[in-house]
Amino acid sequence: MPEAAAIAAESPARKEKSGPQKAMDKLGLLRDIDLALHLPMRYEDETRLTRIADAHEGQTVQCEGIVRDCRVEFRPRRQLVARLDDGSDELVLRFLNFYPSQQKQLAPGTRVRVRGELRGGFFGREMVHPVCKPVAEGTPLADALTPVYPTSAQLPQAYLRKAVASALQRAPLDELLPPASVPPGLPSLREALHFLHHPRPDVALATLQDQTHPAWQRLKFEELLAQQLSQLQAQQERAALRAPPLATMSGGLHERLLAALPFQLTAAQRRVAEEIATDLQRDRPMHRLLQGDVGAGKTVVAALAAAVAMDAGWQCALMAPTEILAEQHFRKLVQWLEPLGIGVAWLTGSRKGKARTQMVARVASGEAALVVGTHAVIQDDVQFARLGLAIVDEQHRFGVAQRLQLKRKSLVGMEPHLLMMSATPIPRTLAMTYFADLDVSTIDELPPGRTPVLTKVFADSKREQVIARIRDEAAKGRQVYWVCPLIEESETLDLQNATETHRLLCEALPGHSVGLLHGRMPAAEKAAVMAQFAGGQMQVLVATTVIEVGVDVPNASLMVIEHAERFGLSQLHQLRGRVGRGAVASVCVLLYTSPLSDTGKARLKAMVDTNDGFEIARRDLDIRGPGEFMGARQSGAPLLRFADLNEDAALLEQARRAAPALLQRQPALAQAHVQRWLGGRAEYLKA
């Protein structure tokens, strides 16, 4: 079978799955090529023996000798203790947890090979819980370093080693790439993988650990090339699609909305609005990311884009990740558009029964020109008469499959234009790599009147001082947020934490109204609490991260974030953006619990150092890496497993140059290369 076909056709041969096989599936090890690309995280050297007399404390060594004695001792606790003699000296082997089979394995007179860290002990030098295996005299040593793979409790290392070794023999690893497209001096893919799974003992371990060895460089180049090819393929497929051309009309809705706004657009807002309007005039789908810092004014730019679509007789859908954010958009859009005669529909999970049925009918008939909502917008019963523009806010909070679903909602057989918005700016290196086919518009200035927020960091022990500051702010008629984190991914604990904090603040602030907002509250109750806070009847709002985006209360001047070390940098920046929206100087207090990890320290320092969302995003990328930053795990987007965008910039540039030529001249090989590296994940680039 030709190589390209072999890769495409390869599928898991396992039918009835054992525990280890299920664990392999969970790790994504479905195909032989997946196992071949599952690289060791470190290596053990079983290629040499060290005489006990020559071994030094603190060294990890392999020794071989005869067991002279083996017994179970009970002081200070039950343990198995054996003595190993190799003719040069003796060594104590100590097992604090052991099985009867281990005791049999270490019967006196047995020759065993042991590997572990040598320590000084009360009864001489010892190894605690070494790896042991009985051997015959003269048993040959390993001729390569022994790989230690990333695994799980259900997948023993020995089972995984056998599976990888077997897959390496079967996997289709023939060269796909023309020699001219590969950087000079690098081994073939087959040679690189065989070497990285079983390196020779004389290799410099440092080059394996820092991934500068030519075998590593070959893998990184291949991965970056696959990623660039998949982006170009998605771009080509999108170029073949058709979308309705939406022209801006003189004196139309777009201009009437601009004239009716109670404020002037900034120069940056005007620039990006023109970029979007130009895209909408084309007959192929716009695929644009609108990014800007917290409070930069993305909603009004989205409203202007929606006005262009609606003026041309098409519908527009705006989807936001939470009801609070969707409602925030809804209120603003109704305020701007209803006076101009535009009907705005509202679709969320909490809208049920007759009200929902009527709204869905208005959307299907085309009577509702603009539809705002949450995931409810993409449910099966929602169909648009003429969907011309889809706007997705906080796009990183949606799975890619959901964005694809929204795009398929049009009944007229045309792709809608897609505008994605994000208040988490994406660093340039990431945009160039992950969004090679995406046009990016950036609002890089804030509207006038926004005051910079001062950020302070306090240990949890200073909580009383923070509460005293809240008392002062409330006495001045200002308002305060207190945010509690999601603890260990548990909504129950999250709820208890917020409820307990709410109770304590109610006791500490008599005479002041303290509200509570969390994800499990009914939508009507959430809306009532937010209305009270926005209206100024409530001084303090204790909330979980449901207030991360979309809440706009200019009178709020203090934000307290509890357990700040548990939040990602971009999330902390989003939360901080809820204050500083009025003329009053605002403060964000980050409360942390000791001891702080290095990552926690780096995050809190970045927050104190800068208010610039782009700098925050750059540091967040450094701390978390591209996969987490992009939300790739939840979205299905391809992760870069081996390459690093900063360290491997030269390889990325070579991959970017090689990809177009390979796709143009040898499209079948290009497709086989993408399939080898990404499998089905390439589909997600189409969102």
Image: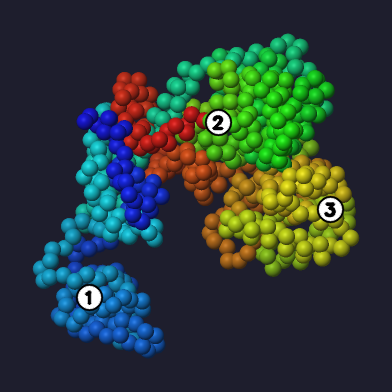
* Mark 3: secondary structure: loop
Cα distance between the residues tagged 1 and 2: 59 Å
As drawn, is 74 to the left or to the right of 283? Answer: left
Which residue is found at the position 37% from the left and 52% from the top? Answer: 22
- Residue nearest the viewer, comparing 557 with 452: 557
Q: Which residue is mark 3?
A: 539
The three-letter amino acid code for the residue at tag 3 is: Gln
The three-letter amino acid code for the residue at tag 1 is: Gln
Instruction: Evaluate if marks 3 and 2 touch, with contact meaning CB atoms under 8 Å apart.
Output: no
Which residue is found at the position 30% from the left and 22% from the top? Answer: 666
Which residue is found at the position 45% from the left and 22% from the top? Answer: 237
Question: Which callout, 3 or 2, points at the residue further toward the start of the chain?
Answer: 2
The numbered disc on residue 342 is none
Front of the two marks 3 and 2: 2
Cα distance between the residues tagged 3 and 1: 70 Å
Q: Which residue is mark 1?
A: 105
Which residue is found at the position 63% from the left and 15% from the top? Answer: 246
Question: Which callout, 3 or 1, points at the residue further toward the start of the chain?
Answer: 1
* Mark 2: secondary structure: helix
As drawn, is 383 to the left or to the right of 669? Answer: right
Q: Which residue is mark 2?
A: 405
Question: Which callout, 1 or 2, points at the residue further toward the start of the chain?
Answer: 1
Instruction: Evaluate if marks 3 and 1 touch, with contact meaning CB atoms under 8 Å apart.
Output: no
The three-letter amino acid code for the residue at tag 2 is: Gln
Density class for disc 3 (Cα within 10 Å; few <14, some 14-19, many ≥20) is: many
Front of the two marks 1 and 2: 2
Instruction: Evaluate if marks 1 and 2 touch, with contact meaning CB atoms under 8 Å apart.
Output: no
Residue 174 found in image quarter: top left
* Mark 1: secondary structure: helix
